[in-house]
Amino acid sequence: MSARQHQVWSVALLAGQRPGTDPLARGFRRGAKAVIPINGRPMIAWVLDALLKSRHVGRIVIIAKDGDLLNDPALVHFMAEPRITVRSGGAGISRNIMALAGRETLPWPIMITTADHPLLTTQMVDDFLARASTHDLSVGMVARETMLARYPGTDRTWLRFSDDGYTGANLFALHTPVTWNALQLWTLAEQDRKKALRLFLHFGPRLAFKALTRRVSGPEGIALAGARLGLSAQLVAMADPDAGIDVDKWSDYWQVDAILRARGAQAAAAAPSGARAAAKISIFDLDRTLTRQPTYTALLLFMAWNHARWRLVLVPLVLAAMLAYLARLVSRRRLKEIEHALLIGSAVPRATVHALAERFADRLDRNGFFAEGRQRIAAERAEGRRVILATAANGFYVEALARRLGIDELVCTRSTWHDDRLTPAIDGDNCYGEAKREMVERHLEAEGLARADIHVRFFSDHASDRPTFEWSDEPVAVNPSAKLRALATRRRWPVLHWS
């Protein structure tokens, strides 16, 4: 092959959306369609993987309305990829590209594709770009015959020519600066991309007449359109029909999701014996991550008020114990045991504990949880992830809170029971700091999951969880303390603010 055929291309990856609310983004409660989950991952993640693995691709510029797009927890690992940058873009796809094309961020030659094309593969990219170096402008399309051979009856937008109908593959190659003319025309024509008559009229009445009366083939039509603009243009017919299926509406979404699942099943079947995909785990801290306020002392005061109100006179002793903890005279574990003994006693019947824990959970359920936290839990499940609550809170009451959150898997501090009565003594480790990470690992190992078998996303508000943050694959700081905010900034971890 010639050196020209091995050219490295910059990629403009369009991740914005047209005016108005996108129904898919709204359905998944996402700010942008590019990050809606499909087969367990944001759509744009599938596209980025395909691009990064291509031998033809150099820099990738994501053009998005939101410059913080990659702060999504499922995308944060792409922030460490030096070839990827994100640029905020206003209205008009082509205007955004024109503002960057030919500069250091997006040097020539340039390929353009979109974030709503999760079926894109590295093979498609390589095949397209290998054929794109011979013309100023190349347009990837899929012939109707090719599409229907694999997906009979599929509903796509077809531009019909004398040889066949064609649907776009969201692949455009701009080889030289002479394609400025094409970008400028795109500014005018992009709103008519699915209306054949209006689209063809942008290239003059002669071409529009030939195309609409099917007196010109697809390749001839693209070549004539290029000539009209003073450049050489070609239609690149894609061999894989999946190249012509993007996600514009719900029917597309379900079709693409099914195709991705089928691909995954084929890959699993072809994998060596014993190989398996990583289990997806999402772990949430509780206090100030999912709840507005800490729960342990609040729970003890609630139980004292409703079970043995006289114990509230011991609150000054509780405050003294807290000061002793701050002075490092007692451990955090011992502080919890002292608080417990003072506020609810050393032998509370199980039935009483259960009833009060349920009442406390009902009270917290009314306005004590962050709505965004609940939405995030639902979104994690929608991505096919297993959700675990890992908290220093004690199991005798946190089980009721977990049920309100729809979580049935817990790693937490356990208490000692004697003759079916709750005692202040903690059984095992206090699930805090390094101990939390160790307890999570033991829990997963008991489920038959080694660290190499899992992908972990971890949400917490406090720097004490640094061991678990660093152990996870995707650490996410939520309403962070000052210390965690500084740590997240240094480590470039995404930060979420829930109110």
Image: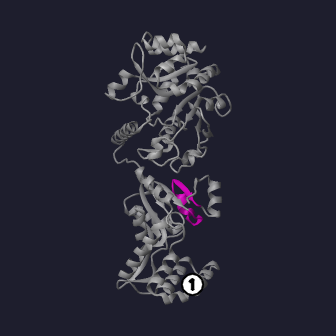
Q: Which residue is at the front of the view, 478 or 419? A: 478
Which residues are the magenta region? 461-479
Tell me which residue sits at (50%, 49%) in the image: 74
Describe residue 68's horizontal placement relative to residue 455 as left or right: right
Q: Percent position (x, y) of residue 222?
A: 50, 16
Whether residue 3 is visible here, answered yes or no, is: no
SS assignment at label 1: helix
Q: Compared with residue 16, is residue 346 higher up or lower down, i.e. above or below?
A: below
Q: Percent position (x, y) of residue 143?
A: 40, 21
Q: Percent position (x, y) of residue 455?
A: 46, 52
Whether residue 57 is visible here, answered yes or no, is: yes
Q: Compared with residue 360, is residue 112 higher up or lower down, i.e. above or below?
A: above
Residue with the mark numbered 1: 318
In the figure, residue 469 lies in which quadrant? bottom right
Tell me which residue sits at (58%, 18%) in the image: 136
Q: Which residue is at the front of the view, 36 or 468? A: 36
Question: Is residue 473 inside the magenta stretch?
Answer: yes
